[in-house]
Structure formats: C-alpha cells, structure tokens
C-alpha cells in the first residue's frame, strides 16, 4: 500500500512541474509569436504602402509628361500639383526640367529641403517617403524629373495601432492563461487532496478492521516490528496478549451475526478504555484480539490482563438481553519468549489456548505448554476420524428424585475412546468439534446411541427418560427435528422418553429459526430443559412463554451453597421461581450428603452429581437403576 504522504509529495511535485512547464512554454512562445505576427503585419502594411505610392507616382508622371514642354500648359501643371496634394498621402510634389528650372511645386509642409530618395519604408527616418521619377515627352525623351514625397505617418500609425492591439491581445491572453493556470492549480490541488484522502481511506481500510475500526493483523505485524526494534535499541521488554471471548460462538450462533457484531464493537471500546495510549489493540479475526504493551514487565502485563478480563466479565447488553461472556488471555514476553513477531504470536496463541483449556483466565507462556498446541492440531484430525470409526461412546449419569429416592432419569454424556490416549472427557473435545464443524455429526451420533439405549431399557420395563445436551449450532440446525424424528422411528422410541437440554442463552434467542425449532420439538412431545440455568440472565417474560418442562441449576451455584449464603439464596430463589412457573428443577453439582439435604430442604425436585454416581456405561447404569429400585421397594 502506497504511503499517502508520498502520494501527496509526488502529486504536488507533478502539479508544480506541470504549471512551471506551461508558464515556461508561454513565456517563450508568446513573445516569439507576438514578434512574428507584428513583423508580418508591419511588412504587409509597408509593402502595400510602397506598391501603392509607386503606382500612383507612375500615373502622376504620365500626367506631368502631358504638360511639360507646352508653355501654355504650365499653369495647368501647377494646378495639377496643387490638386495632387489634396488627395491621398502625397505631401510634396516638384517638377524640374532638364536645366534644373522648377516648373511646378507644391508641398503641405517644408519638406523639399531634405529630399532624399527612399528605396524602402522609413529609410531616412523623416516620416516621408521620397520618390524621383523621370518624365518623358511625346518623343520618348526625358524632359523633366518628378519628385514626390508621401507621408509615412498614417501607415506608421496603423502599424503602431496594430502593435498596441497586439500587445493588448497578448496581455489578455497571458492574463487568461494565468487565470486558467490558477484555476487549474486549484482544481489539480483539489484533485490531489481527493487523491490523498482516497489513499488515506484505502490505507486505513487495508490496515484496519472494518467492524471495530481497530488495527488488523497486517498493521499489528508492522507495530510489532516497530516495538521489537525499539525494545532492542533500549534493551527493554514488552508483552504481547492474544485473547478471545468465551461463549461468543454460542451467542453468535444463537442470536445471529448482528448480535455478535454488536458485542465485538463493544469489546473494542472496552479494550481501548483499559489500555494505555502507547499500547496497540488489534482484531485478528472472529472474536480474537491482540494487544501489544511496550515497556512493561511480567507483573505489569498481568495487572493489565486482569483489567481486561474484568472489563470483559461485565455483562453485554444486546437488543434488550444481558449476556455474560468472559475471555481467555495468553501472554508472551519479549525477548524471553521470542525475538520476532511470528514467534511471539505463536507462543501467545499457545498460552491463550492453554488458558481456555483451563476454563478461561490468564496464562503466561511456558515451554511445556507448546505440546498442547501440537496436540490440538493432531486432536482435530483424530476427532474427525474417531467419529467416523465410532470411537464416541455414551455414558449415563443418573438423576435422583428427591421425594421418592428413585432414579427418575439419566443424562447421556459423550466420551471419546481414543486408541492411544484412552477415555477423553467432553471438556477436551466438544469445543474442538464446534471449531472444526463436526458438532452436528457428533450430536446425532450421541442422540442415536441414547435413543437406542432408551428403547432397549423400555423393552426390559425400565422406562427411564434420557436427556441429551444440544450445542447452539445443533439446536439451530433446520433439519434437527426431522433427524430426531427419524431416530425415534428407527428405534420405536416414544418422544416423551427424550429430554433435550439446551443452554439458557440459546433458548432465549428470539430468532425465526430458534422459534421454529422450539415449536417443532414441542409439537413432537419432546421435553425441553434449560441447562446451566442462572448463568444466562434470562428474561422472565420470555421464560414463562417457552415450551420447557424443567430447569437445571448450574453447578457453580450448588457446589458453594453450603459455604456461600448468596449462592444458597440464588438456589432457593431459582427453585421457587421454577415451581411458580410450573417447572421441575434439577440441581447439578451434588458432591456431598450436605448438598443433598440442603436441596431437599429447599424443595428441589431432582439432583445430579458425583455424590450420587459418576457417569457410567449403559450396562453399569442399568444395574444401578435396577438396584436402586430394589432398595426403594425394600425400604417401602
């Protein structure tokens, strides 16, 4: 991309050269043209004057010849001389015979004294053109001399007038040329400014993100190079942050790209408010941002990263909805973690994904984290292959009815039986499946296995509803309802045996596709449950109109409710709210008997957690269901 200042200099230089060239051409050509035209006009006037007077002189000499030699005609000769001066430019006439006697003379002014015959105009600078002609008699012999003087002043005045008019014309032309040059300078200058503005706009567009107006990856690379050079000269350190938003894809897929764009613009504003003026914040693409902090040590970098995370944890308001997000920040330091931009970016990226893998927060790069980056690339390829090879297994975790003590349902949870790594939990591959675009295939595999198992249990008189988690991407799949119906028909399973768990923010999406999916699933008789309730800032007005049958209280509230009165209050209030809306309540994260007793005292309907049972394979879950029923019957 061309530098706008260089374009300005080049265009200004071009304009100046153009104008100087035009002026130089005119200063050279106009005088030459003016002199040439005047010369031609002057020569024309003078030649015409001389030709005319010689013709008149010749005729006059013939007339004079008719009178000379005839004494009786001398009076007529004088009369001819007097009359000749009355017309034309003739101012002097004298007829002299061969003996030198003046036969006739006439003059307008005293001019004969300086008679000198002229052969070209203005020869003697006396303003009179003198002509001397012989006069021949009837015999053809020269009998007298005719001397004539013609006034050159009228012709000279015409020539001078022509000079003056030519000068005025030249001055007018020069003035017009200067005016046009001035106008051209103004127009060209405006064009130059417009060109510079367009170059500025193109450069800004090429180096900035159009949505957030932040520097893009190209400009970040340039700024990073400048900071590296400055830090090398000053032997200083600086930090590079790479960060992305938590749960942004869920919001984007649920509420649409417009809502995602609003959040990204708000993130850009918050980042600008947190960082210093000397820092650079850039958007690399999607929900990924980078921050360059010159002259900062590890402690200072960590403090700024904490400020950034605090700003990102403030809920975002989008079209009347309050959405909680968060972020993961990876930090790389110069020169400790790299001495060039590529190395720093890669290692900050490694640290960021390590932070995300750890559940969010801040992670400073360490060499041992690099294996995670390689593993992530390898795992993505192996996950695709694993789904195709049926390496995905479904485990089941029971839900306990707190009133009867019976297992009243199970939640289907995916496990990846990796050939080398062993059993991999969902936290390690679900987000990866979303990123590489295989989450819909994975969800359908889990639905198929869960509905097949539910049908198998029904055949042995174990009518246990099976719950399956849906990602936002899968929930917004236009063919989801049809595919679920195909699986239910395939295994002759009742739709009322299936519970679909959907996150709170996904269900709150007021989009045509989300509404259509909800309506179709409800019409099929499939129960819907809000997963992780309490983390999505639901609108009660929307909640009461949704076709849902239960809510699951997020385990983050349940686990700490024995020590934190605020969490306990949230759990109790959620249970009361759900019951008032006619909904069942499932509490996740039951780790101790104290949790179970507290939930029972709050009137909670169902509980789920490691205290009751870890997720188990289908065969073990079946034995647990059967044994729990026998225990209940025995107690009864």
Image (tube, rainbow, N blue to C red):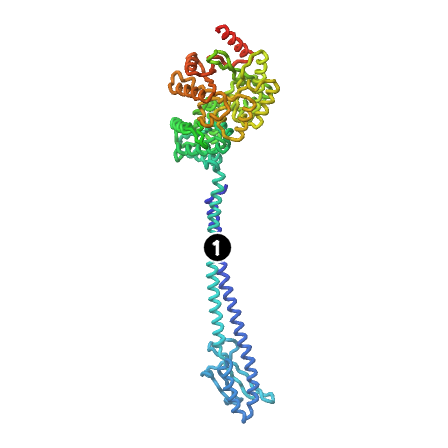
Say what secondary structure mark 1 lies in: helix
Q: Position of residue 478 (x, y in %)?
A: 57, 28
Q: Position of residue 536 (x, y in %)?
A: 45, 25
Please, is residue 453 above or below residue 218 in the view? above
Q: Which residue does the image show at 50% across and 64% down from the upper left?
A: 32
Q: Nearer the viewer, residue 230 or 545?
A: 545
Residue 417, picture quadrant: top right
Q: Does residue 300 appear in this view?
A: yes
Q: Which residue does the image show at 48% across and 6% down from the upper left?
A: 635
Q: Nearer the viewer, residue 542 or 607?
A: 542
Total marks in image: 1
Please, is residue 340 above or below residue 445 in the view? below
Q: Nearer the viewer, residue 4 or 324?
A: 324
Q: Which residue does the image show at 47% across and 40% down from the upper left?
A: 204
- Neighbour tally class for label 1: few under 14, some 14-19, many 20 plus, Cα within 10 Å: some
Q: Residue furthest top?
A: 634
Q: Position of residue 180 (x, y in %)?
A: 48, 58
Residue 597, picture quadrant: top left
Residue 384, picture quadrant: top right
Residue with the mark numbered 1? 184
Q: Nearer the viewer, residue 478 or 444?
A: 478
Q: Position of residue 297 (x, y in %)?
A: 39, 28
């Amino acid at each position: 991309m061309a530098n706008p200042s260089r374009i300005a200099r080049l265009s200004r230089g071009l304009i100046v050269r153009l104008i100087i060239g035009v002026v130089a051409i005119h200063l050279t050509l106009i005088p030459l043209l003016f002199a040439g035209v005047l010369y031609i006009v002057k020569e024309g006037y003078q030649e015409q004057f001389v030709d005319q007077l010689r013709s008149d002189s010749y005729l006059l000499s013939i007339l004079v010849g008719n009178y000379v030699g005839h004494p009786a005609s001398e009076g007529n000769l004088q009369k001819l001389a007097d009359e000749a001066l009355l017309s034309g430019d003739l101012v002097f006439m004298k007829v002299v015979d061969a003996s030198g006697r003046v036969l006739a003379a006439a003059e307008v002014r005293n001019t004969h004294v300086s008679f000198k015959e002229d052969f070209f105009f203005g020869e003697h600078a006396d303003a009179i053109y003198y002509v001397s002609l012989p006069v021949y008699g009837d015999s053809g012999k020269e009998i007298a001399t005719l001397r004539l003087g013609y006034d050159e002043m009228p012709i000279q005045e015409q020539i001078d007038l022509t000079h003056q008019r030519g000068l005025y014309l030249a001055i007018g032309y020069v003035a017009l040329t200067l005016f046009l040059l001035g106008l051209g300078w103004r127009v060209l200058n405006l064009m130059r400014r417009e060109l510079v503005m367009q170059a500025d706009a193109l450069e800004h567009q090429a180096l900035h993100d159009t949505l957030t107006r932040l520097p893009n990856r190209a400009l970040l690379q340039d700024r990073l190079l400048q900071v590296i050079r400055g830090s090398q000269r000053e032997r200083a350190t600086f930090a590079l942050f790479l960060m992305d938003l938590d749960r942004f894809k869920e919001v984007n897929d649920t509420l649409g790209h417009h809502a995602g764009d609003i959040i990204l613009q708000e993130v850009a504003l918050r980042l600008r408010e947190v960082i210093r003026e000397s820092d650079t914040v850039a958007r690399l693409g999607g929900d990924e941002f980078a921050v360059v902090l010159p002259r900062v040590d590890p402690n200072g970098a960590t403090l700024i990263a904490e400020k950034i995370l605090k700003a990102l944890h403030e809920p975002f308001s989008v079209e009347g909805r309050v959405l909680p997000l968060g972020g993961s920040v990876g930090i790389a330091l110069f020169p400790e973690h790299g001495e060039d931009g590529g190395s720093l970016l890669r290692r900050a990226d490694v640290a960021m994904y390590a932070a995300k893998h750890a559940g969010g927060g801040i992670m400073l790069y360490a060499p041992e984290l690099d294996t995670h980056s390689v593993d992530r690339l390898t795992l993505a390829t192996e996950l695709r292959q694993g789904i195709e090879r049926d390496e995905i297994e479904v485990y089941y975790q029971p839900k306990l009815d707190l009133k009867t003590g019976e297992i009243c349902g199970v939640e289907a949870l995916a496990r990846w039986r990796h050939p080398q790594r062993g059993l991999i939990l969902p936290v390690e591959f679900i987000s990866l499946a979303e990123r590489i675009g295989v989450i819909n295939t994975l969800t359908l595999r889990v639905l198929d296995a869960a509905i097949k198992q539910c049908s198998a249990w029904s055949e042995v008189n174990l009518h246990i509803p099976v719950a399956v988690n849906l990602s936002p991407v899968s929930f917004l799949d236009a063919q989801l309802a049809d595919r679920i119906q195909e699986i239910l028909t395939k295994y002759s399973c009742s739709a009322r045996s299936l519970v679909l768990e959907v996150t709170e923010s996904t269900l709150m999406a007021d989009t045509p596709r989300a509404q259509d999916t909800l309506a179709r699933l409800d019409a099929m008789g499939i129960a819907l449950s809000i997963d992780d309730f309490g983390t999505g800032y639901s609108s009660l007005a929307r909640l009461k109109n949704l076709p849902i049958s239960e809510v699951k209280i997020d385990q983050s509230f349940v686990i700490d409710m024995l020590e934190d009165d605020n969490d306990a209050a949230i759990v109790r209030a959620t249970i009361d709210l759900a019951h008032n809306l006619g909904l069942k309540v499932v509490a996740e994260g039951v780790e101790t008997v104290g949790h179970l007793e507290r939930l029972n005292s709050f009137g909670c309907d169902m509980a789920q957690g490691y205290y009751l049972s870890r997720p188990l394979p289908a065969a073990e879950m079946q034995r647990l269901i059967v044994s729990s029923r026998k225990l209940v019957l025995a107690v009864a």
